[in-house]
Amino acid sequence: MDFTLILEWIIKGFVLTLILLGGFAYLTLYERRALARIQARIGPNRAGPFGILQPIADAVKLIFKEELTPALADKLLFLLAPVLTVVPAVVITAVVPWGKQSFSLFGRDITPYIADINVGVLYIMSIASIAVYGIVLAGWSSNNKYAMMGGLRSTAQMISYELTLGLSFVGAILLAGSMRMLDIVEAQKTMWFVVLQPIGTGIFLIATLAEVNRAPFDMPEAEQELTAGYHTEYSGMKFALLFMAEYTKMIAISAIGATLFFGGYREFWFLSNTVFSIDHTPWLGPVYIFIKIVILLFGMIWVRATYPRIRYDRLMAFGWKLLLPMSLALVFITAVGIILAEQVNKNLIWGIPVLSILVGLFAVGMIDRVLRRKDNARL
């Protein structure tokens, strides 16, 4: 294998890792400032101009905090669990394309992504499932009953919503006719998949909130129930790694969502026939996907500021009784709509969003009636 090609992969991986780690640090500032704005308060504004040095202050504080390891913990797994949690959050972005065309650097063509594989979506699903090991090992290795219960609860949550998350990918795969991420982006040249898959996009966004343990699915942080969940015994930099994993996953999931449903690096629809189109100005691709990632991240923050944490039994019922059946129905509707559009009339493709919205409304009404009936039975 060409040594320069290996060196290119290493350099691009190193640069992407640095970007994600820097993004993680300033995502915490972005979240705190956005939450402060939503809740009519000031937020961080002391460390540096406009509080821009606050992430650095937080990092210094965590570095100098005392590292504690329980005496009866499995020390190897206790140290390994945070690493198993944060590494998948970084490597999952290897197949995300950040631009369309390669650029020349030092006489060599450099592609704006690390790997271009035919099964990019399958790679994402497989890597996302690895993070479960880190969480369950973090709870088990601590030799703490509360940490163990938090680890089991978070693991059950992630496995439950991974099924829905995987099925939400199928709609984009069917519409693009490929699992290659570049093909999926280019298939959205004329129309983003969010238009044809509004319910699928909503299911994806909800499932990702549960996958990264964000509010209102932040069961590990339900202090009134299980202290701090699977990271009860962690402190210092080991806790920082678990904290880093959550925010790095937020960036990775937003990049994947932007690629699958919002056109990825392609321009916004109102710029399609202008000089700002990717076909005319390819270097704007990373700018467009960065804007989409920031918007999706704000959506996660907005949800955290708006919705309270839901009860655990409702969380599981919501995943198994509503999202999973809706995802299966959406896969069927999408497949039938594509076949009818190809064989009968291409305008029948618009039956996909119409039918999916009707199915979504019906499913929401049914689950609401079931939950209300159960609550009344308890009373």
Image (tube, helix red, strand yellow):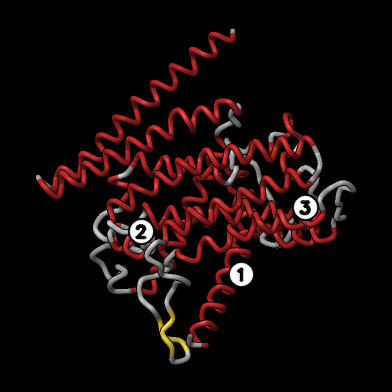
Q: Distance between the residues labelled 3 and 1?
A: 25 Å
Q: How far apart are marks 1 and 2 (CA)?
A: 27 Å
Q: Which of marks 1 and 2 is nearer the N terminus?
A: 1
Give the side of residue 107 with respect to residue 195, left or right: right
Residue at point 38%, 22% (across, down): 365
Q: Which of 32 and 7 is in front in this view?
A: 7
Q: Name the residue under label 3.
A: 78
Q: Earlier in the sequence, mark 3 or mark 1?
A: 1
Give the side of residue 270 with respect to residue 244, left or right: left
Q: Which of marks 3 and 2 is nearer the N terminus?
A: 3
Give amino acid for label 2: Met
Q: Which residue lies furthest to the right in this view?
A: 71
Q: Nearer the viewer, residue 12 or 73?
A: 73
Q: Quadrant of residue 88?
A: bottom right
Q: Eyeballing the image, is 180 above or below 166?
A: below
Helix, strand or loop at mark 2: loop
